[in-house]
Image (cartoon, rainbow, N blue to C red):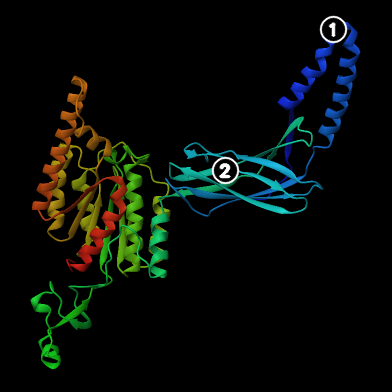
Amino acid sequence: MKSGSTKSSFAPTPRLAGLLVAAALPSVWAPTAWVSQAALAILATAAVADLLASRRRIEAVRKPGPVLSIGAENPITVELQNLSSTPVDLELKDDLPLHMAAPGEWPKLTAAPGKWATVQYRVKPMRRGQYVLGPLHGRYLSKLGLWSRRITWPITETARVYPNLKAARQWELAIQQGRHLEGLKRARLRGQGTEFESLREYQEGDQYKAINWAATARTGKLTTTLYQIDRSQPVMLLIDAGRLMTPYVNGLAKLDHALNAALLLATVAAERDDHCGLMLFGGEVKAFMPPRKGRGQVLAMMEALYNVAPEQVEPDYGRMLGWFRAKHKKRSLVVFFTDMIDPHISKGLIEHLSALASHHVVLLVCMADPALLALSQLSPSDSKAVYQKVAALEVLAQRAETKARLQAKGVLVIDVPPEEFSTAVVNHYLLIKEQGRL
């Protein structure tokens, strides 16, 4: 938005205050009082002239990105045009909403006469949703440095904060450039599918049934048939937005970590030509999107998720999963984002996910809490530390037991710290595709 009529104010600088004190000092001794009076008169004249000459006409335009990502550094661009005849050294500062961390240092620039200048600063939103940026403020010193003038441009922009899309964008860019995204599995679209892709010489580890005996007889060398992994398979993302997803880990709610990972997985699935769908629930179903393929589906998911907050409710997993089974019957990879920290809830979850795994490939995704892991590794120095370590070990043991019971029922389980969370989800999806488990 371009600036309209600006507001300005001015204030004396420490330099002017210091000069006033220096000019007044001779007045303490009567014979030199005239010196003080003369100095004050000169200083007053210079200060007024400096103030009158300090006015500058400057226009400003703020350009936030169309999409801001939660928990990431997002650039905000400001363009300024100095319509005055002299250059000006500006310090800028923006009014930011709550839950949007300010940059460590606000931008400074020199705006040349009659020209546009561009600067950037970065903000880090810690909540999803819609926010208003602005107004914008600038400050500069008069030519003699006696006055500080502040300009306020009454410009505001509405910015939407979405789940972190940067990993998804990096993935798309890496695919376009034929590169590999660090941390993600180097998965080729080859595996135990049904579509013929190519022949190659047998390599150690190839399955016996993959040997092409006709080609082997023709070439005199053991030859393996490679198959294309089946495409257009359904992937359903089930996301718990209840009480278990409200705690914060590394500055973000567990729900936000889950949404970041879900959108990265949806992006990768779209590139793999799979159909991806979504179900978000708390006390009730908050969003349901049947599986579709393509980038348009990922964008629709972004819009459905950007303003969702976790609820302080206990989801009825039996009712929610029953609702899902009634709505979606085709065998799919079901990626279920929740937590296993409550043993009472986990008991029911085992039963319901086991039933779901009888028809679908079920991947349960949970986040390990680094604080809990740190407590379990403490060397206790007092009784309080002993209690904390015992409690942490007990929780971890319960999680391990729940994980083992789920795996025994055929449910795949991810339980990793936040720095590995998104890549672990995508890597499991790629591995499931390679193994042809769908």
Residue visible at 23% across and 83% down? 198
The residue pinned by badge 1 equals 29
At which x and y percent is residue 417?
27, 45
Tell me where residue 321 appears, x and y as whole percent.
21, 51
Q: Secondary structure at mark 2?
A: strand
What amino acid type is highlighted by mark number 2? Leu
Residue under circle 2? 133
378 or 298: nearer the viewer: 378
Query: Which is nearer the N-term, disc 2 or disc 1?
Result: 1
Mark 2 Cα within 10 Å, few/some/many (few <14, many 20+)?
A: some
Foreground of the two, 406 or 434:
434
User: Quick check: 40 left or right of 69?
Assistant: right
Report whether 346 appears left or right of 165.
left
In the displayed structure, 346 sits above or below 12; it is below
Q: Say if mark 2 contacts mark 1, CB within 8 Å.
A: no
Against 164, is 311 above or below? above
Q: Which quadrant, please, contains the C terminus?
A: bottom left
Q: Position of residue 335 (x, y in %)?
A: 24, 55
Whether residue 136 is visible to the viewer of this picture, yes or no, is no
Image mark for residue 152:
none
Q: Residue 14 location, x and y as percent? A: 71, 25
Q: Nearer the viewer, residue 389 or 63?
A: 389
* Local crowd size for mark 1, using a 10 Å CA cut-off: few (<14), some (14–19), many (≥20): few
Residue that extends furthest to the top in the rendered view of this protein: 30
Cα separation between marks 2 and 1:
55 Å
- Give the image quarter of residue 236: bottom left
Q: What type is the residue that disc 1 sits on?
A: Trp
Q: Does any portion of residue 236 appear in the rendered image? A: yes
Q: Secondary structure at mark 1?
A: loop
